[in-house]
Image (tube, rainbow, N blue to C red):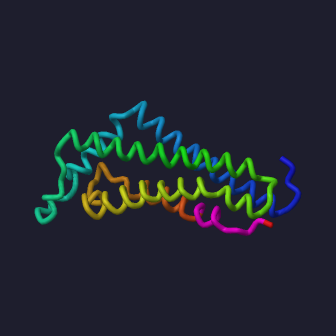
Amino acid sequence: MNIKNTDQLIRYSKIYLMACFSLFGLLVMFHNVTDYNSNYEYVAHILSMDTTRINENIRYRAIESPILHHRIYWFIITTEAIFTAYCLIGTYHLYRKINDSAAEFHEAKKFSIIGILIAIFTYYVCLQTVGVEWFDMDTSQTWNAKDWARHIVDFILPVLIFITLKNER
């Protein structure tokens, strides 16, 4: 790695952050496939609303079908696989264009941006919005991933902003 100036360092830092987030996606996918039951159990409890505070006004929202639990969990795993694939491809494209013009490097960001947006959908929309607001996940003492999902969004949102900035010359 021959870093000559700050502009090159900025480009390398974008590649590094995408590689880090791609690694996160790979580890999440590996965990969900090799230890399917641990997170399936989480999803089933949240969807069933069986560990949330009892609020009869929203109890109708509960999904108690194990078949639907599996399908929703596989939907989450699929979105994780898709965002990881896009982030890996995006990292590769950024690396491939590291020494090209600013315009070409900027265009190489497309897959990274798509991957991050899918990750935001997964962790913000699916877990934080639907999990917390619809299934009342934040009231569960044992099956509450609100803070975990928020930490992921707190990382990837600034990465999205940083990646999209067109500050390379």
Do we see residue 6 in this rendering?
yes
Magenta stretch: includes residue 110: no
Observer-nearest residue: 20 or 145? 20
Measuring from the top left, give residue 87's x and y in whole percent: 58, 49
In the image, what residue occupies the spot 42% across and 30% down?
34
Res 56 quadrant in image: bottom left
Residue 148 placement, left or right of 20 = left
Q: Is 1 placed left or right of 163 in the picture?
A: right
Q: Is residue 117 left or right of residue 58?
A: right
The residue sitting at 30% across, 49% down in the picture is 143
- Segment colored magenta: 159-168
Instruction: Please say whether residue 167 is one of the residues in the magenta stretch.
Output: yes
Please tell me which residue is depicted at 68% across the width and 49% down the height of the picture: 93
Residue 50 visible in the displayed image: no
Residue drawn at 63 percent across, 65 percent down:
164
**Image position, residue 128 (x, y; %):** 37, 60
Q: Position of residue 32 (x, y in %)?
A: 41, 37
Work out whether 168 lies above or below 17.
below
* Residue 123, quarter of the rendered image: bottom left
Quadrant location, the C terminus: bottom right
Residue most toward the left?
56
**Magenta stretch prevailing secondary structure:** helix
Q: Is residue 42 above or below residue 168?
A: above
| Relative horizontal placement of residue 18, taking residue 156 as reference (left or right) | right
